[in-house]
């Protein structure tokens, strides 16, 4: 599959009479966007705000972050299985409003949601303090169950991002990037002298409100399968999660998976990037065994020499990570793991809930238990009182002055396990 991604650089965002992009400025018709996002009888109210880098704005609780995009050529739409038909994506041309994002907030769905500060020390931990954010605050009607509430907010975000993305339909991109993966046998033979590298993409599916979707299907319901990397880059995988903000993959990060991007940068030079295996993170031991067995089998079937494995979440999913690692290594295939750590506030505790002697090449993206104090902001979009209850917070986290003292676990993207964040790691 060959995918062209045309980026239209967004340097500012403003409200205006017509939704369009002019001279690098995304102009948003506020009322029209609210109407599109709120097109659901289960929504009681929709409010739209703007949050720009450097402003004294806090968004809490953050449900999802989504990049506005539009398909210009090729099959499908930007959110297949949700706002468009279930056509296979990953080829043709897609235009992106690069630098813009839709952020959804509102009444809290599940306790594992996050915070984005647009300035101050918290802004240094989240990549979404650097984006021009269109914040959609969605409050549902009374009486919805949590899973219904999550679906309402998720779909409102997708509709909003699709609406904004259409502003890029007929624009000339500032730059175009081309990504291509050929059918497996053809791809292997193209660079026969380079090591064949695959990517095992673990999707969060571990329990209620821990949902990731593949072409509209809850990944709890899938068995590990092969997928073109360009499909992932083109919207085949989206978030429905209410998991810890620090290492959650919002839809924006699935759309811009840096592991896939970096593998493409080395493709044909240092490595032969032959494709992806997507797998889930399960609750029961038997399900973990099944998925890890099949993941290792697929990697072997591809003929990979090496594999990068990323996880989403911590604790229970650490067992899936370790099982994938050990079973793939036992087949003679080298692995590199990407994970964050929950090593206690002093950094002295065991970093992962499970371990294996085969996990001898690991990239850490940070300790989520590190404590930080976020100063008060002039403007809060959402409901700041949830600071005491979201994962990483505790009773008394929200100060009388509006400051928040909590673990960096509360900050969206602070220890993202794809490396889509602001922390760096060093080898010692």
Image (tube, rainbow, N blue to C red):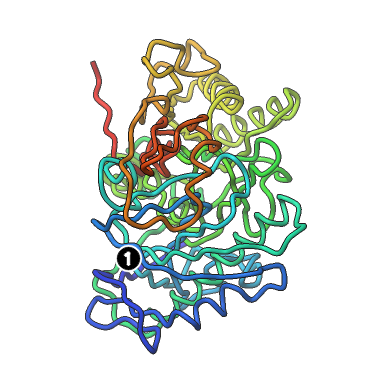
Task: Indicate the position of residue 84 as horizontal and vertical percent values.
Answer: 62, 72
Identified at 28% across, 70% down, the residue is: 10
Q: Nearer the viewer, residue 420 or 80?
A: 420
| Rendered position, 294 above or below 264 | above
Task: Indicate the position of residue 242 as horizontal and vertical percent values.
Answer: 59, 44
Whether residue 196 is visible, yes or no, is no
Drawn side of residue 393 relative to residue 379, left or right: right
| Rendered position, 396 above or below 44 | above
Identified at 65% across, 35% down, the residue is: 206
| Rendered position, 357 above or below 52 | above
Drawn side of residue 125 relative to residue 335, left or right: left
Identified at 66% across, 69% down, the residue is: 44
Q: Nearer the viewer, residue 287 or 402?
A: 402
Drawn side of residue 415 relative to residue 316, left or right: left
Location of residue 39 by image quarter: bottom right
Identified at 64% across, 40% down, the residue is: 205
Whether residue 326 is visible, yes or no, is yes
Task: Indicate the position of residue 71 as horizontal and vertical percent values.
Answer: 47, 74
Residue that sits furthest to the bottom in the current view: 17
Task: Indicate the position of residue 396 as horizontal and vertical percent values.
Answer: 47, 31
Find disc 1 in the rendering and name its residue: 98
Q: Nearer the viewer, residue 187 or 95?
A: 95
| Rendered position, 259 above or below 157 | above
Callout 1: SS: strand
Q: Rate crowding at label 1 as few (under 14), some (14 to 19) or many (20 or more) other CA atoms within 10 Å.
A: many
Count of marks overlaid on the render: 1
Q: For the C terminus, which image quadrant?
A: top left
């Amino acid at each position: 599959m060959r995918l062209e991604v045309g980026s239209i650089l967004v340097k500012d965002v403003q409200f205006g009479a017509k939704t369009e992009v002019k001279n690098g400025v995304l102009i948003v018709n506020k009322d029209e966007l609210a109407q599109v996002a709120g097109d659901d009888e289960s929504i009681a109210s929709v409010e739209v705000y703007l949050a720009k880098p450097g402003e004294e704005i806090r968004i809490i609780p953050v449900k999802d972050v989504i990049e506005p995009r539009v398909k210009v050529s090729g099959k499908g739409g930007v959110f297949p299985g949700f706002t468009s038909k279930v056509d296979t994506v990953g080829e043709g041309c897609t235009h992106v409003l690069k630098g813009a994002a839709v952020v959804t907030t509102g009444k809290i769905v599940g306790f594992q949601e996050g915070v984005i500060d647009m300035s101050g020390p918290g802004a240094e931990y989240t990549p979404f303090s650097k984006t021009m954010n269109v914040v959609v605050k969605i409050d549902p009607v009374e009486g919805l169950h949590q899973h219904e509430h999550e679906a309402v907010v998720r779909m409102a975000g997708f509709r909003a991002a699709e609406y904004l993305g259409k502003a890029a339909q007929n624009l000339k991109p500032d730059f175009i990037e081309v990504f291509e993966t050929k059918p497996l046998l053809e791809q292997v033979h193209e660079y026969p002298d380079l090591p064949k590298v695959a990517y095992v993409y673990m999707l969060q599916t571990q329990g209620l409100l821990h949902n990731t979707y593949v072409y509209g299907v809850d990944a709890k319901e899938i068995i590990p399968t092969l997928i073109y990397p360009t499909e992932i880059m083109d919207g085949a995988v989206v978030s429905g999660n209410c998991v810890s903000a620090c290492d959650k993959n919002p839809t924006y990060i699935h759309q811009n998976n840096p592991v896939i991007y970096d593998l493409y940068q080395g493709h044909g030079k240092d490595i032969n990037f032959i494709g992806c295996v997507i797998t889930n993170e399960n609750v029961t031991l038997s399900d973990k065994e099944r998925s890890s067995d099949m993941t290792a089998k697929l990697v072997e079937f591809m003929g990979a020499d090496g594999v990068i494995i990323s996880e989403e979440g911590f604790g229970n999913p650490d067992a899936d990570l370790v099982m994938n690692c050990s079973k793939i290594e036992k087949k003679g295939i080298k692995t590199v793991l990407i994970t964050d750590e929950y090593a206690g506030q002093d950094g002295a505790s065991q970093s992962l809930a499970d371990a294996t002697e085969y996990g001898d090449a690991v990239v850490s993206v940070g300790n989520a238990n590190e404590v930080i104090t976020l100063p008060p902001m002039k403007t809060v979009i959402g409901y700041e009182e949830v600071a005491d209850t979201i994962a990483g917070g505790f009773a008394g986290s929200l100060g009388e002055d509006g400051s928040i003292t909590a673990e960096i676990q509360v900050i969206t993207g602070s220890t993202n396990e794809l490396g889509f964040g602001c922390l760096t790691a060093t080898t010692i």
